[in-house]
Image: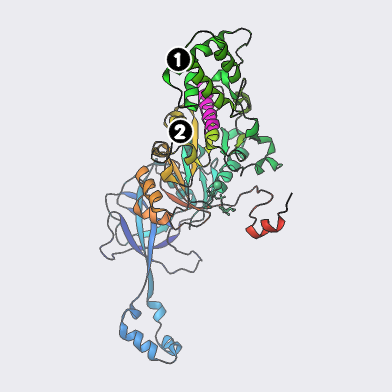
Amino acid sequence: MTIKIGIVFNYLQLPDVSKFPFVINKRRDGVFIRKGLFVYTKSNEGFLIGIIEKIVLLNEYFSDALTIKAYNNNNNPNILKGLFPSDDFEFAIAIVKCLGIIKFKDDKEKEISKIQRMTYPASPGIEVYLVEEELLNKFLGFDIEHGLNVGQVKVSNFNAKISMDRLLNKHFSILAISGAGKSYLTSILIEELITRDSSFGTPAIILIDVHGEYSYLKDLIELKDKVKIQDISYFQIAVPNLNEYSFKKYQEQISNVQIRELAKYIKKLKKDDKKKGKYTLSDILDIIENESDGNKSTKQALIGWLSELDHLTLFGSQENPSLNKIIHKQEILIFNLQKEISIRKKQIIVDYICSRLFYLRRMNRIPPFLLIVEEAHQFCPEAAHSKAISKPIIEMIAREGRKFMACLCLISQRPKKLSTTALSQCNSKMVLNIKNPYDLKHLMDSSEAITQEYASMISSLGVGEMLLMGNAVNYPAFIDIRERKYKPQFEDNSLAQVCLKWQNK
Ligand SMILES: Nc1ncnc2c1ncn2[C@@H]1O[C@H](COP(=O)(O)OP(=O)(O)OP(=O)(O)O)[C@@H](O)[C@H]1O
Ligand SMILES: [Mg+2]
């Protein structure tokens, strides 16, 4: 059903190519015309779609100072109102920002073939209509049947069902200040992905959970079969999977001479039939110590570096968990790093996970996956801020992952501290509230779609509101994020409640 809402007219040098004003019809059917609504009209070029940017209320009667004075002087304004129906003089004008001309594939106007830029203004006198749900979905590029339901498009209140293919095709990021709802939104995306119909096709999800916020997913009866939590205390890197350069990555100070020496020992161990390809760091240390030839000081230095690595208790003869066995389609594997304090250890773990996942995916030994990295600025920082062991591999997945269907989701509260290389590859962005002007500027630099106007809107978003932009949608859209279906048992405990419950153990 098409709902007529007004007529285009001339107002302050408008309409022009980018904007048109219309007089809003007085209505009694409860349709409330507000800022942010999507509307359309038929211009010379075709179907012109736009968004209401501003509403102005005008009343000729009150535009004259003398009238106001008379109105005020009268002791009982109701008498004057009765004599003169000033309400009838009021009318509302909406200013619409034009977004594009929709071209349909055929006359039935069912499928959009493309969205063009406007080159000619809307004509005064033509009708303006409200965009219906079906058309809005097509215009924004949502997937009504198989999409991920994250909430509702602001003001229009239609479901926002993001197309999974479009979102995961080119990586995405979730950015906002602390407490704006990044993790909450992530849990909604996880809900949608692991509970959608298996016939739709869904990748595996791997989540680097820095604060242990997602462990509750395992406690829910509806989800528990699809959720695996990997406590990091049992995490083990398979030493036979590492070459000499991996060690240099983990222990930067190892010199090139020492690397060459180390390569010799690794080769020897690999050939050792007794070991059957299974050896640990202590085996490498043993062989270095017992070998008679080789430069003594080089060997001593190597022993020093490798023993230090051994102390991290991360290295063993086999990988745990065994990544090529534990990753399945439409299931989530959560690495809980909550108990780990050492940032270096966390980076080594993340580096190993990412490297292995990318390798296994390239070899097609695991299904397409979505790798979600919480607090991504800790693992992939911009060079000016700090160095991180895991940065090169995350940047590599950001650059090349798409070709192998390895999708990345970077979550961060400090976009400025996040690697620009990685961030600029995150084509879709879910931006919640960001206040810091440096972070906003950095965002604007990394994505041309974020204009000054959007930046000021981003800084005034509330909890549960986001701006979705990039490859996932044809046009940036503001969305009210829905409530999550599956909740942790102890959600939203206030500080006072936690203090009351807390007891010395
Ligand atoms: N869409 C929403 N609806 C209702 N409550 C929400 C919504 N989004 C966030 N919240 C609430 O806001 C609070 C903070 O959310 P969340 O933990 O996701 O923030 P965050 O951005 O991940 O913060 P941090 O950067 O510190 O990790 C939570 O208590 C959550 O319940
Ligand atoms: Mg969080």
Query: Which residue shows up at 39% across the image and 37% down it?
Result: 383
Q: Furthest-bottom residue in view?
A: 75
**Residue 4 at x, y = what percent?**
42, 61
- For this view, does 353 lie left or right of residue 459? right
**103 shown above or below 26:** above
**What's the magenta bit mostly, secondary-structure-wise?**
helix
**Residue 266 at x, y = what percent?**
53, 14
Does the magenta portion include 256?
no
**Circle 1 sits on which residue?**
260
**Rendered image: mark on residue 152:** none
The residue tagged with tag 1: helix, strand or loop?
helix
The residue tagged with tag 2: helix, strand or loop?
helix
- Among the two numbered marks 2 and 1 on one chain, the one whose residue lies closer to the N terminus: 1
Q: Cβ(mark 2) to ligand 1 < 8 Å? A: no
- Please, what is the three-letter code of the amino acid marked with disc 2? Lys
Does the magenta portion include 359?
yes
Query: Which residue shows up at 31% across the image and 46% down it?
Result: 117
- For this view, does 243 lie left or right of residue 447? right
Residue 145 image-quadrant placement? top right
Badge 1: how crowded within 10 Å, few (<14), some, or many (20+)? few
Residue 494 image-quadrant placement? bottom right
**Circle 2 sits on which residue?**
391
Q: Furthest-front residue in view?
A: 297
Q: CA distance from mark 2 to mark 1?
A: 24 Å
Q: Furthest-right residue in view?
A: 505
What range is drawn magenta here? Answer: 347-366
**Residue 450 at x, y = what percent?**
37, 48
